[in-house]
Amino acid sequence: MMFLLLLLLSYSLMAEDWPDWRGENRTGRWSEKEIIEAFEDSVIPLQWKAKIGSGYSGPTVAKGKVYLMDYLKDHKTERVLCFDAYTGINIWTLKYACTYERIGYPAGPRASVVIENNRAYALGAKGHLHCLDANTGTVLWKSDLNSSLLIDMPIWGIAASPLLWNDLLILQIGGEGNASVIALDKNTGHEVWRNLSDPISYASPVITKQQDKEILIVWTGEHVNGLNPGNGELYWKIPFKQRSQMAISTPVIYGSKVFVSSFFNGSLLIEMSKSGTAATTLWQRSGKNERNTDALHCCMNTPIIMDECIFGVDSYGELRCLDLANGNRIWEDQTAVLRNRWANIHFVQNGLNTWMFNEQGEVLITQLSKQGFKEISRSKLIEPTTEQLNRSGTGVTWSHPAFANKHVYARNDSILVCADLSR
């Protein structure tokens, strides 16, 4: 027993965690070495699986534990769950009453549980916010933001994952009184600042650094905004009004550039000044409609930018490569995910390889370049389910997976799974 504990402790110390939405710093990058180069079979063998409820909340991983949120529809209950990352044993569960009135696609919570310094921050679809002891699930503080801020609730609920920055917890929340974005003291939950009156979107905020200044990027339903994360001061805003506030994918930072893309309104590329306190539009492109698109009309996927090219999934699952300079299409491929409205792939970059998790529950090891899409290997990880979306009985897997500890963690509407990807 002592040997096993020492082995797990040693493994934990060497492992690379995935403690936030899209991993460390929200970049969708995974730097671990000594992982497999191709799959051996058409189905990935599981290390473990655990029973859960439905929801869109992607798992996060920190210090040997896996966290996510789900919803028990029959009990009208949201839950925050913690599992052992190596065995799948449930360590603790927090549950609270939550009725999904006027929430479209009511499968469950959207945001990822964010972990820092043995604390877990969980935000539900109706604005229930909890700061928990990450080891025990003990509530350290909590807030019903829908009641306290009178949220102008978007049709699909609160979806943007909380963002930690220094001593602040920053939220795109949509409260009354210039509280589209708020910052709370992460230790107490007390409000520190608020700003913006825009209707909110579903896109998680990110932090970028220009020279020595950190800039908070928040994509709302009407603008892409650059703010001072310390006090909420607005540095700049670029108009980009969204139909149905449907901005979902995370803003992508590439040097001084900010790229965003949405299903109905196409793509926008912004250039920040050297200090980050000013910005201008480099180009904006949009097609006639969702079937006749121009450049890139992303739904949920967050594109990646490499070698002056943008790679992302268009409105019906078309994997595209664009020229960063002007948005011109370089190539298109329809083999990575089946063609469907809102068809989705999550991208994670590991060295030269782009790992993809598509909505059919498949993991693909690929390489993306200006020359085209190269599929190296593909295997099934988890079956789609129908609570998130029923595609004629086939379902989807829309939640973002976590890549940590040389493992992959993914969920559908009924199970959380873990598979070993080490060589």
Image (cartoon, rainbow, N blue to C red):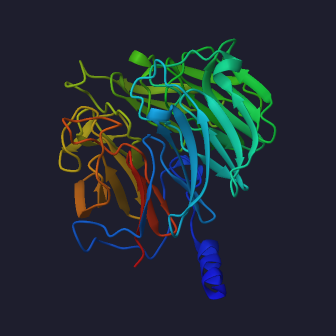
x, y percentage for residue 240?
Answer: 46, 19
x, y percentage for residue 244?
Answer: 41, 17
Name the residue: 47% across, 38% down: 72
Placement of 151 over or under 213, stated as above or below: above
Name the residue: 51% across, 69% down: 87
x, y percentage for residue 281?
Answer: 47, 25
Work out whether residue 109 or residue 284 is closer to the camera in this orientation and state it.
Answer: 109
Q: Is residue 82 left or right of residue 268?
A: right
Name of the residue lying farthest toward the bottom:
3
Work out whether residue 292 or residue 329 is closer to the camera in this orientation and state it.
Answer: 292
x, y percentage for residue 181?
Answer: 65, 25
Work out whether residue 330 or residue 320 is closer to the camera in this orientation and state it.
Answer: 320
Placement of 44 over or under 296, stated as above or below: below
Name the residue: 52% across, 68% down: 405
Q: Is residue 168 left or right of residue 69?
A: right
Name of the residue lying farthest toward the front:
75
Quadrant (top left/top right/bottom left/bottom right) for the C terminus? bottom left
Quadrant (top left/top right/bottom left/bottom right) for the N terminus? bottom right
> In the rendered image, which quarter is residue 186 located in?
top right
Name the residue: 45% across, 22% down: 103
